[in-house]
Image: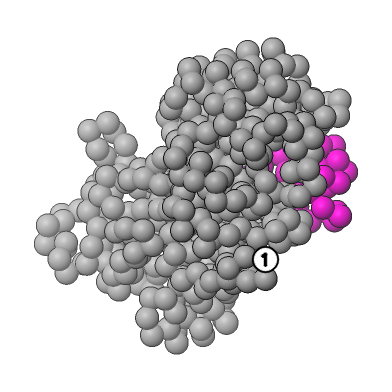
């Protein structure tokens, strides 16, 4: 066992944060050998019980749950910052040409190494990630995540139509490959498989049907895709499926809505779609930096909370512009405030933070496993240094309550704020 003495942040309910100015976090092995939180609370209350446990004192630091990224594309590292007129031309001119490179094992391996290191440098300890249509890309990412003990879910991208040579796959073989990858990787260490149809236009009816059959056969795997991101994309789907009530209706038709199904964006949807998500347990991966960058639209937080479906935050690199959870939380605040196309609201700092930790874990079906520091949660956390930059230090010193502190970190924070990322007691210094 090991203990850490510092300020602590964790959650007891939906967006209900607990802050201990002088806290103690105790970690150790459970009956299955996992490194988990054994106890959390004030130092004065817990120290007598754990007096014999080696304790690291971290004055001036804040320990918080590791961040959870619900949607990110590892093959798009080199697509970040590529100019485009919108989603579809961006895919055609930058994304698909880049993803062709992942047919080469060496390229997959070096990209996976950089990708995992960048997640850890930014305090992300759990991620649901897209690979490419190449089996090599999936194996490389799983292997690197396993090496670093990261909890990661990914899968081979299914795309057998409306895609260029080099990334387009073949229907039957794509489904055979998907099942083989499920059997090889799902449930190994901290890894999980995600059935990954790219989006409706890229998949034939046969491929979507096969994906749904695999989802029924393996009910504990994840499903990930995109929905209702862009109006041109939605018009395309309407032409392909004129009888479908909505974009979500197509996924429903093929059995791809259920718990552990995660759809990025969910911008241009209505209350019937939202009710469908709630009824099926389908979650939204809110991707604010990507939506702002590509001009796609604004996620409707009021609608999501009024109907009550699960959601959490995502970087969506490389349409998203940063790996940093702080940049993502700040962009989510901007998106929430926008009130011209939807009801505007001001998201509270604790709620923003919850969306990228315990809320995202809940949306992924991992509540009580990751994204929090409650006893029994896996011992993934970040050590934050509020004095990491001059303006940040100046502003956080003025905070008179938790919301002011968290909002200063959200607005002014970046990778410099992450002093250390700890996964199962393996420390990854962020500035190394």
How many numbered discs sit on the rendered protein? 1
Q: Nearer the viewer, residue 51 or 208?
A: 208
Q: Is residue 389 above or below residue 184?
A: below
Residue 104, quarter of picture: top right
The x, y position of residue 393, in whole percent, is 51, 80
Q: Position of residue 22 (x, y in %)?
A: 27, 71
Colour style of the rendered protein structure: one colour
The C terminus is located in which quarter? bottom right
Does residue 236 appear left or right of residue 143 in this picture?
right
- Residue at x-position 46% and y-position 37%: 280
Is 281 left or right of 101, judged from the image as shown? left
Asked which secondary structure carries label 1, the reply is loop
Vertical side of 297 occupied by 236: above or below: above
Residue, x 61% and y 39% (percent of image)?
248
> 410 above or below 139?
below
Q: Is residue 380 above or below residue 43?
A: above
Look at the image and give the residue range highlighted in magenta. 72-98
* Residue 366 inside the magenta-drawn segment: no
Q: Is residue 30 visible?
A: yes
Instruction: Point out residue 134 in the picture as x, y percentages from the top left corner.
Output: 71, 25
Which SS does the magenta portion mostly show? helix
The residue shown at (82%, 52%) is 86
Depth order, front residue of 168/387: 168
- Is residue 107 something one can see in this rendering? no
Name the residue at 61% across, 58% down: 299
Residue denoted by label 1: 341
Q: In front here: 265 or 322?
A: 265
Query: Neighbour class for label 1 at 10 Å: few (<14), some, many (≥20)?
Result: few
């Amino acid at each position: 066992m090991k203990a850490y003495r510092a300020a602590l942040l964790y959650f007891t309910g939906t967006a209900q944060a607990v802050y201990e100015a002088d806290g103690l976090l105790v970690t150790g092995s459970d009956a299955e050998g996992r490194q988990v939180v054994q106890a959390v609370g004030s130092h004065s209350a817990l120290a007598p019980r754990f007096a014999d446990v080696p304790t690291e004192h971290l004055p001036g630091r804040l320990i918080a749950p590791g961040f959870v990224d619900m949607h990110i594309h590892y093959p798009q590292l080199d697509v970040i910052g590529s100019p485009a007129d919108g989603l579809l031309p961006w895919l055609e001119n930058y994304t698909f040409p880049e993803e062709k490179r992942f047919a080469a094992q060496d390229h997959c391996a070096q990209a996976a190494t950089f990708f995992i290191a960048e997640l850890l440098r930014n305090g992300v300890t759990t991620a649901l990630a897209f690979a490419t249509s190449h089996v090599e890309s999936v194996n490389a990412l799983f292997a690197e995540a396993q090496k670093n003990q990261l909890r990661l879910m990914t899968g081979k991208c299914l795309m057998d139509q409306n895609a260029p040579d080099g990334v387009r796959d073949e229907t039957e073989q794509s489904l055979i490959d998907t099942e083989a990858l499920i059997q090889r990787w799902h449930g190994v260490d901290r890894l999980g498989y995600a059935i990954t149809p790219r989006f409706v236009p890229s998949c034939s009816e046969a491929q979507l049907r096969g994906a749904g059959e695999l989802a029924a056969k393996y009910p504990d795997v994840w499903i990930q895709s995109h929905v209702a991101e862009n109006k041109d994309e939605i018009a395309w789907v309407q032409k392909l499926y004129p009888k479908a009530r909505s974009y979500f209706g197509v996924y429903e038709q093929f059995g791809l809505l259920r718990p552990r199904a995660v759809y990025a964006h969910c911008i241009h949807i209505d209350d019937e779609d939202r009710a469908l998500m709630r009824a099926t347990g389908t979650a939204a991966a809110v991707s604010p930096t990507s939506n702002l960058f590509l001009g796609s639209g604004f996620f409707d937080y009021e609608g999501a909370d009024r109907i009550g479906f699960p959601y959490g935050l995502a970087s969506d690199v490389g349409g998203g512009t940063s790996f940093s959870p702080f940049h993502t939380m700040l962009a989510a605040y901007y998106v929430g405030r926008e009130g011209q196309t939807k009801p505007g609201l001001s998201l509270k700092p604790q709620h923003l933070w919850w969306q990228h930790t315990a809320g995202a874990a809940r949306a992924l079906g991992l509540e009580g496993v990751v994204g929090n520091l409650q006893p029994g949660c896996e011992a993934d956390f970040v050590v934050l240094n509020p004095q990491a930059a001059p303006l940040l230090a100046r502003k956080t010193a003025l905070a008179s309550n938790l919301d002011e502190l968290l909002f200063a970190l959200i607005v002014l924070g970046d990778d410099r704020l992450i002093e250390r990322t700890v996964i199962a007691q393996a420390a990854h210094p962020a500035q190394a």
